[in-house]
Image (tube, rainbow, N blue to C red):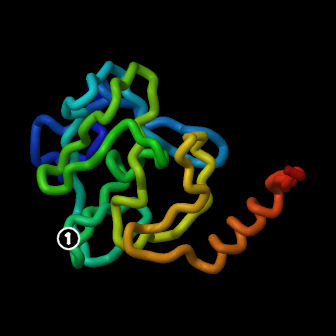
Amino acid sequence: MTEIYPRDLIVDTSLPDSDQFAVTAVDGRVGRGIRANIPFGRGTRVAKFAGTLSNTVFQHSLQVSPETHLHDPYFVGLLSHSCAPNCVLDMQRLEILALLDIEPGELLTIDYAVTEDTLYRQFPCNCGSSHCRRWITGRREAVNEEGRAYLAQLAAKLPRVHRGAR
């Protein structure tokens, strides 16, 4: 068993380890992510997590309160985004819960739009979900100029619907 967190962040013996999870490359676009090594049933606790508290939003931070963010570049901050995620975070208990059954080898995903009021950086999404929003923002921020341009470009590429005669 290899620890995922550095020793100075291991405040709980139930934090995730390499027997349960793999920190892995996702693909050429996304970077690193977390894959399950064991199955998790829907509604169960997938893992506890830890991090460093800060009043700054970082790329791998999660909002605990309006002014406080948990920075975790080792585990929970590496969860991949999906508009139809298989996990959800409980920020009060610092736990990841399974929304769906998760099989070994499956990438753990959360909806980044619910992790921060304002994201470190908005980004385009092509998660493949039928619910994909195409551009991801924080829960309290509007789509920025780059996002509006990106969404307009996507809309321009959609096939035009021809209205037929009645």
Number of marks present in the image shown: 1
Q: Is residue 82 above or below residue 100?
A: below
Pick the front one: 3 or 123? 123
Which residue is at 68% across, 65% downward? 151
Provide residue 132's location: percent of width, then percent of height: 56, 49
- In the image, 72: left or right of 59? left
Element marked by disc 1: strand
Pick the front one: 102 or 55? 102
- In the image, 126: left or right of 74? right
Which residue is at 37% across, 53% downward? 77
Query: Quadrant location of residue 138?
Result: bottom left
- In the image, 118: left or right of 51? right
Q: Is residue 93 above or below residue 150?
A: above
Mark 1 is surrounded, within 10 Å at the Cα level, by few (under 14), some (14 to 19) or many (20 or more) other residues, namely few
Q: Is residue 42 above or below residue 115?
A: above
Provide residue 18's location: percent of width, then percent of height: 32, 29
Pick the front one: 150 or 61? 150
The residue wearing badge 1 is: 65
Which residue is at 10% across, 43% downward? 12
Query: Quadrant location of residue 95?
Result: top left
Quarter of the rendering occupied by the N terminus:
top left
Q: Residue furthest front?
A: 166
Provide residue 72's location: percent of width, then percent of height: 31, 56
Which residue is at 34% across, 30% downward? 100
- In the image, 156: left or right of 64? right
Please state which amino acid type lies under the numbered disc 1: Ser
